[in-house]
């Protein structure tokens, strides 16, 4: 009788133990970001410089036929404006738009060319300006902060169930 009661209570509490999808998406994003950085920071065997655009130049690091990382910068002042780090599979990349080349920085993950997971915009002082999740567009709560880090706005964009698709996307 005692065992049956414990079993019933355990089964009844299982849904309550499920991780909120926002927490799953946060952990998924941090894990993927870490793996991309690790895989892209190996020694390159070739570097290409593309200076065909007078406003932008690209430096691309390769290992064989695999892109490792790419830096886009302005030749006038040398500011790195965008850094892109590529996964071994070339299906994932981590994009970073950087200050002072732009008025705010950005960091986000793309999978097969589409933005997904955690997206963060930061003031040039490093504090978060805006943060939220993407999966087939912006979803869930997006939070906006002032330069001191105080929350000034939070908007629920709905469609949080889209984040469940992250569970089907395995890092390769």
Image (cartoon, helix red, strand yellow):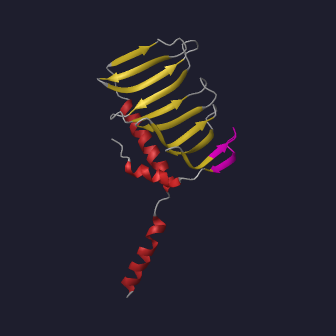
User: Residue, x 48% and y 50% (percent of image)?
Assistant: 25
Q: Position of residue 73 (x, y in %)?
A: 52, 19
User: Residue, x 49% and y 21% (percent of image)?
Assistant: 72
Compare residues 102 and 2 and report the one nearer the observer.
102
Compare residues 156 and 79 and report the one nearer the observer.
156
Q: Residue furthest bottom?
A: 1
- Look at the picture and state if 105 lies above or below 137: above
- Look at the picture and state if 78 lies above or below 106: above
The mark tally for this picture is 0
Instruction: Report the magenta stretch's main SS.
Output: strand
Quarter of the image for residue 11 reads bottom left
Which quadrant: the N terminus? bottom left
- Look at the picture and state if 44 lies above or below 22: above
Residue 145 lies within the magenta run: yes
Q: Position of residue 82 (x, y in %)?
A: 51, 26
Which quadrant: the C terminus? top left
- Look at the picture and state if 44 lies above or below 110: above
Q: Position of residue 142 (x, y in %)?
A: 61, 47
Image position of 165 (left or right of 118): left
Compare residues 9 and 133 and report the one nearer the observer.
133
Residue 67 lies within the magenta run: no
Bounds of the magenta segment:
143-155
User: Residue, x 37% and y 34% (percent of image)?
Assistant: 87
User: Residue, x 64% and y 34% (percent of image)?
Assistant: 123
Q: Position of residue 9 (x, y in %)?
A: 44, 78
């Amino acid at each position: 009788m005692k065992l049956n009661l414990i079993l019933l209570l355990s089964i009844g509490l299982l849904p309550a133990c499920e991780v909120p999808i926002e927490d799953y998406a946060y952990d998924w994003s941090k894990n993927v970001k870490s793996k991309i950085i690790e895989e892209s920071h190996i020694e390159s065997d070739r570097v290409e410089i593309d200076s065909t655009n007078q406003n932008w130049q690209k430096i691309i690091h390769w290992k064989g036929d695999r892109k490792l990382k790419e830096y886009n910068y302005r030749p006038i002042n040398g500011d790195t404006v965008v850094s892109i780090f590529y996964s071994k599979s070339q299906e994932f990349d981590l994009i970073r738009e950087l200050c002072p080349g732009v008025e705010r920085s950005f960091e986000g993950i793309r999978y097969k060319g589409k933005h997904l997971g955690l997206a963060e915009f930061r003031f040039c002082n490093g504090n978060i300006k805006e943060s939220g999740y993407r999966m087939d567009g912006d979803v869930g709560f997006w939070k906006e902060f002032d330069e001191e880090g105080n929350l000034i706005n939070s908007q629920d964009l709905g469609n949080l169930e889209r984040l469940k698709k992250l569970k089907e996307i395995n890092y390769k």
